Image (cartoon, helix red, strand yellow):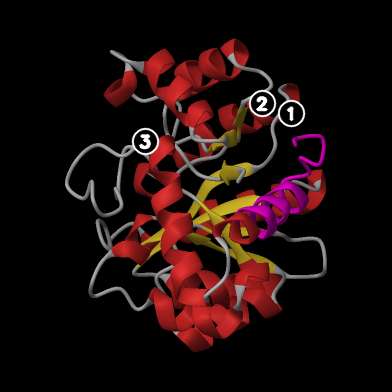
Amino acid sequence: MVLIDTHTHIYLDDFKEDQSEMIHRAKQENISALLMPNIDLTSVNDLISLASSYPDYCFPMMGLHPCSVSENFRSELDTIYNYLSQGNWIGIGEIGLDLYWNKTSFSDQLDSFKIQLEWSKALRLPVSIHSREATEESLQLIEELQDGTLSGVFHCFSGTLEQAKRVCHAGFKLGIGGVVTYKKSTLPEIISSVGPHYLVLETDAPYLSPVPFRGKRNEPSYLKFVAMQISEILSMPIEEIGQITSQNARTTFNLNTIS
């Protein structure tokens, strides 16, 4: 079984004490690649440093997280675009909308999201979309701007079945992580309906640890518990879940050189 973690923040301070050991554990669990979306300008240096240390294993994205959108977001976007135009990035992220933490900045969040989606079109790079309590708003914008060039993942998908089908119709994948292992999760019904070919796996480490590690720091080696749950939901061998979701990740992020 080979898995790809399509969304992990292992460059954060949460992993400073055992970063190399944590990466070793991921490799031991047959995680073949770690995809790392950026957060904001404060995280760029650590992101680049880790990607440089593991160039064939840790693959970076560049973007501005909606929770980091402030009054000077346009200036920050200018700097982020400079990074994006110079580096070797696999995607644009983490971008999107968040109506959980801050509803007052929605207009600026929306502008930031639109700008970065236009980058995606121009640069032909997939996006990693954050849409906490804003799935409908994020999806409407994708549907409005989709001209066949937008692609990517709705990270930590938390919408309805109808919205999930619209995400798939728009040419995007559903990012499934530890939430699928929670008792009250609605993801099993969605996964049963859409099937494995629209799914990619993720941890969002250090957040959203799967059962049996819920409440503790998450890490990529725990991705197997997400795969196990999906395997059970779809009554498919876990090896097949790994094969399909990993190929989905390779195709979405143009990583077909990764085994």
- Distance CA(mark 3)–CA(mark 1): 30 Å
Classify mark 2: residues with Cα within 10 Å, few (<14), some (14-19) or many (20+): few
Q: CA distance from mark 2 to mark 3?
A: 30 Å
Magenta range is 242-259
Residue 10: within the magenta?
Answer: no
Instruction: Tell me, for residue 219, which label it has, or none.
Output: 3
Mark seen at residue 85: 1
The residues tagged by marks 2 and 1 sit, at their Cα atoms, a distance apart of 5 Å
What amino acid type is highlighted by mark number 2?
Answer: Asn
Mark closest to the chain's N terminus, 2 or 3: 2
Check the picture and name the quadrant holding the C terminus.
Answer: top right
Kind of residue at badge 1: Ser
188 in relation to 217, above or below: below
Residue 151 seen in the current view: yes
Amino acid type of the residue tagged 3 in the rendering: Glu
Up/down of 249 relative to 231, above or below? above
The number of callouts visible is 3
- Label 1 near label 2: C-beta < 8 Å? yes
Q: Which residue is mark 2?
A: 82
Which of the two discs, 3 and 1, sits closer to the camera? Answer: 3
Asked whether, in this view, residue 219 is left or right of residue 196, the answer is: left
Q: Where in the figure is residue 43, as x and y percent of width and height?
A: 43, 25
User: Residue 70, position in %: x, y?
Assistant: 36, 42
Which residue is drawn at the image coordinates 71% and 59% (left, top)? 151
